[in-house]
Image: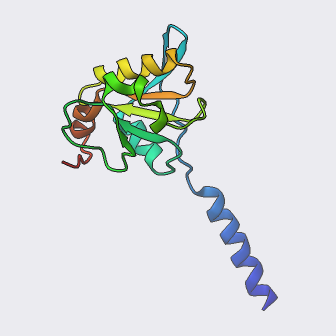
C-alpha cells in the first residue's frame, strides 16, 4: 500500500504546482488631484471577477444595463451624495463603469477627491465589455 501512496502523492504535488494562477491585474494608473485611480481593460475586469474582492458600481445614467455581478447602480453625478451606499473603508476596492468610460472616469475623480484610495475604472465601459464578447444584463 505504501508503494502506491508515494507515487500518487508525488504526482499530486507535481500537478498542483503546475496549475496556473490568475495573472495579477495592474492596469494603468491615472494621476488626478488628490491621488490616482487605475484604468483596467474588459479582459482585466473579467479576470478579476473570478476572485471578486471589490464592489462593482455602475455609474451610467440613464440606466442601459449592467455587467453581471454588479453590486450597485449610482448615477455618476450623485456619487458624492451616495457615499452611504459605498464601503465606509476608504481603502476598499471599488470598480466603476458606465457605458463608454467617461462618466465612470468623472466618478473616479470625485471619489479620489473625497479620500478614496483604491478606485478602479473600466476603460471603454460597457461598450468595450460587449466588444470583448462579454455579457450585459438588460
Going 73% across and 86% down the picture, which residue do you hit?
4
| Front in this rendered view, residue 34 or 13 | 34
Count how many numbered circles sit on residues in the image. Answer: 0
Image quadrant of residue 47?
top left
On the image, the x and y values in percent for residue 96 come to 39, 31
Task: Report the residue that reaches farthest toward the bottom.
Answer: 1
Left or right of 15, for residue 113:
left
Quarter of the figure with the N terminus: bottom right
On the image, the x and y values in percent for residue 27 come to 47, 27
Going 56% across and 49% down the picture, which residue do you hit?
21
| Front in this rendered view, residue 62 or 126 | 62
On the image, the x and y values in percent for residue 99 come to 23, 30
Q: Is residue 116 above or below residue 85?
A: above
Q: Is residue 130 above or below residue 2?
A: above
| Front in this rendered view, residue 91 or 101 | 91
On the image, the x and y values in percent for residue 13 come to 70, 66
Left or right of 131, for residue 32:
right
Image quadrant of residue 72?
top left
Going 18% across and 48% down the picture, which residue do you hit?
138
Q: Is residue 110 above or below residue 95?
A: above
Task: Report the residue that reaches farthest toward the right.
Answer: 2
Going 55% across and 10% down the picture, which residue do you hit?
34
Amino acid at each position: 500500500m505504501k508503494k502506491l501512496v508515494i507515487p500518487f502523492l508525488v504526482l499530486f504535488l507535481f500537478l498542483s504546482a503546475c496549475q496556473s494562477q490568475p495573472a495579477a491585474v495592474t492596469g494603468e494608473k491615472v494621476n488626478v488631484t488628490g491621488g490616482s485611480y487605475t484604468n483596467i481593460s474588459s479582459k482585466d475586469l473579467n479576470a478579476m471577477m473570478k476572485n471578486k474582492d471589490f464592489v462593482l458600481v455602475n455609474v451610467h445614467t440613464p440606466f442601459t444595463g449592467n455587467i453581471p455581478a454588479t453590486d450597485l447602480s449610482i448615477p455618476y453625478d450623485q456619487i458624492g451624495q451616495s457615499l452611504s451606499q459605498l464601503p465606509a473603508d476608504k481603502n476598499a476596492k471599488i470598480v466603476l463603469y458606465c457605458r463608454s468610460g467617461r462618466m465612470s472616469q468623472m466618478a473616479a475623480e470625485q471619489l479620489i477627491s473625497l479620500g478614496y484610495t483604491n478606485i478602479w475604472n473600466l476603460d471603454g465601459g460597457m461598450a468595450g465589455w460587449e466588444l470583448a464578447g462579454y455579457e450585459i444584463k438588460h
